[in-house]
Amino acid sequence: MNGRDAAERNETTNVDEDMSETFEMVAKTLPGLEEVLAQELTELGADDVVMGRRMVAFRGDKEMMYRANLCLRTALRILKPIAHFEATDADEVYQAVKAVEWEKWLDVEKTFAVDATVYSQEFRHSKFVVYRVKDAIADHFSEHLGKRPSVRLNGADVQLNIHIAERQCTLSVDSSGESLHRRGYRQETMEAPLNEVLAAGMILMTGWRGECDLIDPMCGSGTIPIEAELIARNIAPGIFRKEFAFERWPDFDADLLQRIYNDDSRERDFNHRIYAYDNAPRAIETARRNMKAAGALHDIELKLQPFQQFEKPAERAIIVTNPPYGERISTDDLLGLYRMIGERLKHAMAGGEAWILSYRDECFDSIGLKATRRVALNNGPLECEYRQYELFDGTYRAFRGSGEELNKPSRDEAERRRSGSRREARIEQRGTGRREGRTAGRYEERNEPRRERRNGDEADSRRWKPRSGESYPERKRRQQHKEE
């Protein structure tokens, strides 16, 4: 297939939003969280939800795209495909991209950036693919208008993604911009901070939605407790964001975004508590600042306490935690730490449930408890496992005799264990106010406050207030003037 054939094929597969009320989208995620993300999209009302590798495809309208960016907890970014084509080399990619009607997405006064995701034997250098895509866009404008838009690596007006799986290419415009895991509430971090998307996925995977207390006895900078509070009250994680990329698109609907943002009809009450402990004073202070920025201190009890002093909760509770692995965070006696964790769980969590993310087999072995579920997850570059422990009083035989059933591993997980080592299984799976304190960025100035609540540990109840008399367009003009 020559370059002209590729261009002609691309013309027949341009994605035209005007032809349909809905359009296709792709939500990117971390490996292992595809099923959780698919469930989120289904609950949000998306159509034609289909899981893939590190992504979930779906269909929806502009409102669904805005809601997906604002509400999804386990998505990294939301892509909108604008062209599909086949290519066997970078020249064919160039011809197909050049044939796109770029005037719908760009003008010469705007900047753009391109990133590539490549799984192909035909394309071994993703950076070269990026260069050819940039050249194609620039040459398209040069030939049609005599001018070309500029490339900007950071903060571009339009961000594009080219995804190549063998010969199948998808060109998309990125509606999110900065990765959605960057919620906006994090003020400070500790060593090896947990990705917010991973933390939310860990919690959702347990099935917990606020029905009982939740405990993180090794909370670090507080990511798990904060994400748990947002889940328990069903508060959209995107309310902290200063901006989404789609706000720079020509068809951006400010009124629609404002209506979605101010819709709190899906939020709910939370009648339990979240407990966050750590043995490091600096971690406690960092977590406190992050929780205050998220407006979450009202629901979270934060305390300086080592795991050795953990006592049985007064109410039914679930533990979700991410102990040190001995990789980015060192400890004098790593295996001793995990033995202590197992001992505390055995004696202080009888009748409860614990979920632990860790890296080394010997760490899990040192816990000394039988896991009832194992899930392969990546924490950054580390291939980890997330294990569930259901803890019972007395012996296992007596527990089973009472009619209780432990959660069994899924058929796929059981087959992976039989087929080889845990690391090989991972490789197969990877294939690769309420508003004050929540809205320190640009959304703090919406026209109407949504609700009143006590913010953190402050004694007074405050109302989230917009900037006096300033409409959304006026605020946009003021910000643009300030930037200039």
Image (cartoon, rainbow, N blue to C red):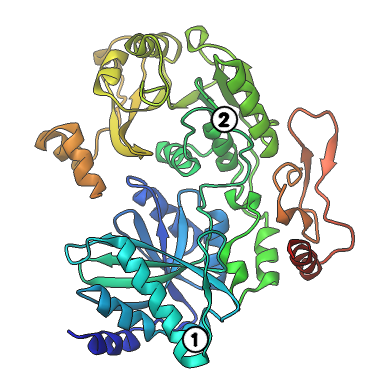
Residue 227 shows up from this direction: yes
Which element type, helix, strand or loop, lies under badge 2?
loop
* Label 2 – label 1 distance at C-alpha: 44 Å
> Mark 1 or mark 2, which is nearer the start of the sequence?
1
Residue 101 shows up from this direction: no
Q: Amino acid at mark 1?
A: Asp
Q: Position of residue 457 (x, y in %)?
A: 76, 27
Marker disc for residue 65 = none
Q: On the rendered image, what quadrant is the C terminus found in? A: bottom right
Which is nearer the eye, 40 or 433? Answer: 433
User: Within the image, what quadrant is residue 331 found in?
Assistant: top left
Q: Which residue is mark 2?
A: 222
Q: Residue at x 47, y 44 (%)?
A: 197
Q: Which residue is mark 1?
A: 18
- The answer to whether 460 appears left or right of 137 in the picture is right
Which is nearer the eye, 125 or 470? Answer: 125
Which element type, helix, strand or loop, lies under badge 1?
helix
Q: Amino acid at mark 2?
A: Gly
- The answer to whether 201 appears left or right of 284 in the picture is left
Q: Residue at x 61, y 42 (%)?
A: 233
Q: On the rendered image, what quadrant is the N terminus found in? A: bottom left
- Give neighbour class at mark 1: few <14, some 14-19, many 20+ (Cα, 10 Å): few
